[in-house]
Amino acid sequence: MATDYDEPRVKPEDEPANESLEVIQAQRSATSQSPAIDVDDADTAEGIDLPGADLSQEELLIQVVPEQEDEFTCMSCFLVRHRSQLAREKDGAKYCLECEG
C-alpha cells in the first residue's frame, strides 16, 4: 500500500475525544490551575534588569583592560582586534579583515 507523506499525521492522543461537556468540566475542575506563579528563590526582583533601569549604583565586577599597542578598534564592527587582523586604514579609521572580507 502506498503511503501519502503529505497527509497530516495525527496521533491517537491528539484526536478529539467524544466526551460530554460535563466530563470535560469535571476533568478541568479536578486539575484546576492556581493563579499563583511558581517562583524560584533565584527569581527575585534583584535578578531582573529592565531596559532603561538606573544602574548608577551598580558596581562593575570585571576588570577593564585598555586597548594595547598591538590592538586597534574596527570602525565597522567596533571590536578590538589584534593588528594582524588589520585590513585597511583610511583617514585614521581602521577596519578589520572580517568587515572588509
Image: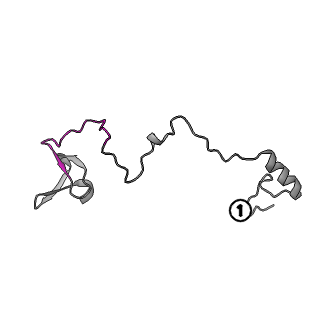
Residue 24 falls left or right of residue 77: right
**Was residue 40 drawn as part of the magenta stretch in this picture?**
no
Closer to the camera, 14 or 1? 14
Closer to the camera, 71 or 1? 71
Closer to the camera, 47 or 69? 47
Q: Residue at x 26, y 58 (%)?
A: 99
Q: Residues within 10 Å of mark 1 (few under 14, many from 20)?
A: few
Q: Which residue is mark 1?
A: 5
Residue 56 falls left or right of residue 95: right
Closer to the camera, 70 or 40? 40
Q: Which residues are magenta?
A: 57-73
The percent coordinates of residue 94 (x first, y second) are 16, 56
Specify the quadrant of the image occupied by residue 65.
Answer: top left
The local secondary structure at tag 1 comes to: loop
Q: Residue at x 25, y 35 (%)?
A: 63
Residue found at the very far left of the displayed protein: 91
Q: Can residue 101 be seen in this snapshot?
A: no
Quadrant of the drawing holding the C terminus: bottom left
**Was residue 72 drawn as part of the magenta stretch in this picture?**
yes
Q: Residue at x 76, y 61 (%)?
A: 3
The percent coordinates of residue 14 (x first, y second) are 77, 55
Quadrant of the drawing holding the N terminus: bottom right
Compared to 7, does 40 lie above or below? above
Which SS type dominates the magenta stretch?
Answer: loop
- The amino acid at mark 1 is Tyr
Q: Residue at x 10, y 62 (%)?
A: 91
